[in-house]
């Protein structure tokens, strides 16, 4: 378990915790100020990993992404350990997540969605060419910095999980199918669901059981016919 962290806690002798930004199955995320670099805010993820091999893998992949320096991937600064917990110091995206915008707006215009989709496709293409797959792409992990630049977050961290069910391809549910963890189509499927959510609204599969969700995914009958044929074709190709 991660030891108690509260507002004002100093981590690694140089980060003062300002507030808690969120939490999930991987751990918790905090907003902190850098005490050595003036006016610099960072996001610090505390991870509850108990597998040394997975921890080594995670650090190696995060370092790879730091070296990549892609403008649409959340920057990884460095990591440290304290009280047997692993902390990742990341770029702070003050613009919030695409999920927060979606919940506020309800849906977006096709032109806006297409612009975001092109940026996400180009980013995934660049990262996939380097052999890295996200595994948990969704609006919650798509962030914006203070200038409104779109960034994909939780690379590496996402690889410690199997994904989020509504965004997972049906092959990942089926014991008869074998899907390599290095198969980038996992992310393309999640992108297709994300595009549809941005056009239609959040909670696309809300209230469905796992069996009903799998059946719906296999039938591919959940794309509204009210969308223009060309955008439906784009989504169908992704799915």
Image: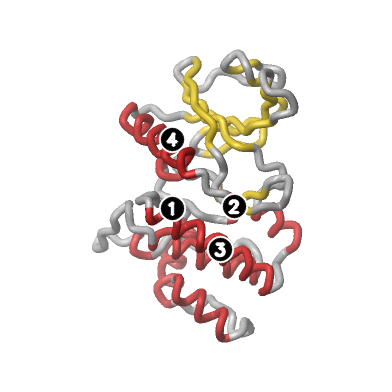
Residue at image mark 3:
194
Whether label 3 touches label 2, CB < 8 Å: yes
Q: Quadrant of residue 207?
A: bottom right
Of the residues under marks 1 and 4, which one precedes in the sequence? 4
Residue at image mark 4:
63
Q: Measure the alpha-carbon separation of dots 4 and 2.
A: 20 Å
Q: Nearer the viewer, residue 135 or 27?
A: 135
Residue at image mark 2:
142
Of the residues under marks 4 and 3, which one precedes in the sequence? 4
Residue 5 position, x and y percent, is: 62, 20
Q: Measure the alpha-carbon separation of dots 3 and 1.
A: 18 Å
Residue 52 position, x and y percent, is: 33, 27
Q: Is label 2 in a helix, a strand or a loop?
A: strand
Q: Quadrant of residue 37?
A: top right
Whether label 4 touches label 2, CB < 8 Å: no
Q: Is label 1 in a helix, a strand or a loop?
A: helix
Q: How many marks?
A: 4
Q: Measure the alpha-carbon separation of dots 1 and 4.
A: 13 Å
Point out the frontmost of discs 3 and 1: 1
Which residue does the image show at 40% across and 41% down from the upper left?
160
Which residue does the image show at 69% across and 31% down from the upper left?
41
Point out the frontmost of discs 4 and 3: 4
Q: Is label 4 in a helix, a strand or a loop?
A: helix
Of the residues under marks 3 and 1, which one precedes in the sequence? 1
Residue 6 position, x and y percent, is: 67, 21
Q: Nearer the viewer, residue 189 or 212?
A: 189
Residue at image mark 1:
127
Point out the frontmost of discs 4 and 2: 4
Tell me if 97 is positioned left or right of 50 in this view.
Answer: right
């Amino acid at each position: 378990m991660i030891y108690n962290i509260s507002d004002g806690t100093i981590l690694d002798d140089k980060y003062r915790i300002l507030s808690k930004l969120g939490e999930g199955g991987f751990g918790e995320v905090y907003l902190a100020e850098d005490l050595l670099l003036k006016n610099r805010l960072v996001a610090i993820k505390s991870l509850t990993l108990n597998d040394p091999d997975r921890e080594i893998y995670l650090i190696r992949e995060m370092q790879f992404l730091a070296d990549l320096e892609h403008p649409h991937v959340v920057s990884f600064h460095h990591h440290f350990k304290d009280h047997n917990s692993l902390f990742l110091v990341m770029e702070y995206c003050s613009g919030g997540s695409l999920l927060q915008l979606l919940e506020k707006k309800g849906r977006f215009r096709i032109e806006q969605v297409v612009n975001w989709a092109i940026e996400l496709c180009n980013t995934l293409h660049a990262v996939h060419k380097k052999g890295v797959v996200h595994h948990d792409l969704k609006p919650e992990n798509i962030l914006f910095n203070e200038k409104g630049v779109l960034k994909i977050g939780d690379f590496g961290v996402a690889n410690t999980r199997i994904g989020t069910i509504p965004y997972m391809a049906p092959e990942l549910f089926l014991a008869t199918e074998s899907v390599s963890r290095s198969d980038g189509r996992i992310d393309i499927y999640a992108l297709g669901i994300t595009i549809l959510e941005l056009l239609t609204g959040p909670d696309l599969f809300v209230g469905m059981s796992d069996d009903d969700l799998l059946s719906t995914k296999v039938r591919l009958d959940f794309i509204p016919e009210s969308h223009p044929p060309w955008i439906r074709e784009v989504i169908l190709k992704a799915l």
